[in-house]
Image (tube, grey):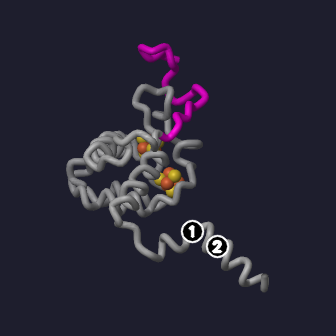
Amino acid sequence: MSKLPNGHREGSLEAPTRHPINWQDPDFYNEGSLVKELDRVFDICHGCRRCVSLCNAFPTLFDRSETMEIDGVAKEDYWQVVDHCYLCDLCFMTKCHYVPPNPWNVDFPHLMLRAKAVKYKNGGTRARAKILNSTRWQQLEGASDAGI
Ligand code: SF4
Ligand code: SF4
């Protein structure tokens, strides 16, 4: 088994490292910086395509390109990919061979979470999604159903 320059083995054979989400860093909400990271990770995914069967996010990413590369995907279509991710974490936990400590440092679910946070902050989240994701609303609905 070949070793990478940093001493790690190829193929994600190390236990994955989960870096904390850096949500308190102002750059976390910087849309330009987010798109740069989406460009980087989506480019890696286009060259790999291993997760195509996991959910609708990956087929959306791959099918939107006429060139079969990331340069054929319109930036506005990035948000369709983000919308199709429901943060199940399967791609990180079971498929991806580029998760940290691999130097490519791909954490697809955390990147989708960051994109959803940026979209929310910019007012791009629809009322239906806000209601369905509100734990407070679900608590009130549950209480109402139970007659409390
Ligand atoms: S975390 Fe998102 S992108 Fe990854 S498998 Fe789950 S739904 Fe798909
Ligand atoms: S998340 Fe990892 S395994 Fe899945 S398509 Fe992207 S690079 Fe490949």
Q: Position of residue 88 (x, y in %)?
A: 57, 54
Element type at mark 2: helix
Q: Nearer the viewer, residue 26 or 100?
A: 26
Q: Is residue 38 above or below residue 116?
A: above
Q: Is residue 131 above or below residue 56?
A: below
Element type at mark 1: loop
Queried whether the magenta region covers residue 14, the answer comes back as yes
Q: Which residues are magenta?
A: 1-21
Cα–Cα span, label 2 and label 1: 6 Å
At 43% across and 58% down in the image, what residue appears? 57
Q: Position of residue 16 (x, y in %)?
A: 57, 32
At 29% across and 44% down in the image, what residue appears? 39
Asked whether the viewer can see residue 118, the reply is yes
Dominant SS type (magenta): loop
Which kind of residue does numbered mark 1 sit on?
Ser
Local crowd size for mark 2, using a 10 Å CA cut-off: few (<14), some (14–19), many (≥20) = few
Contact between marks 2 and 1 (CB within 8 A): the answer is yes
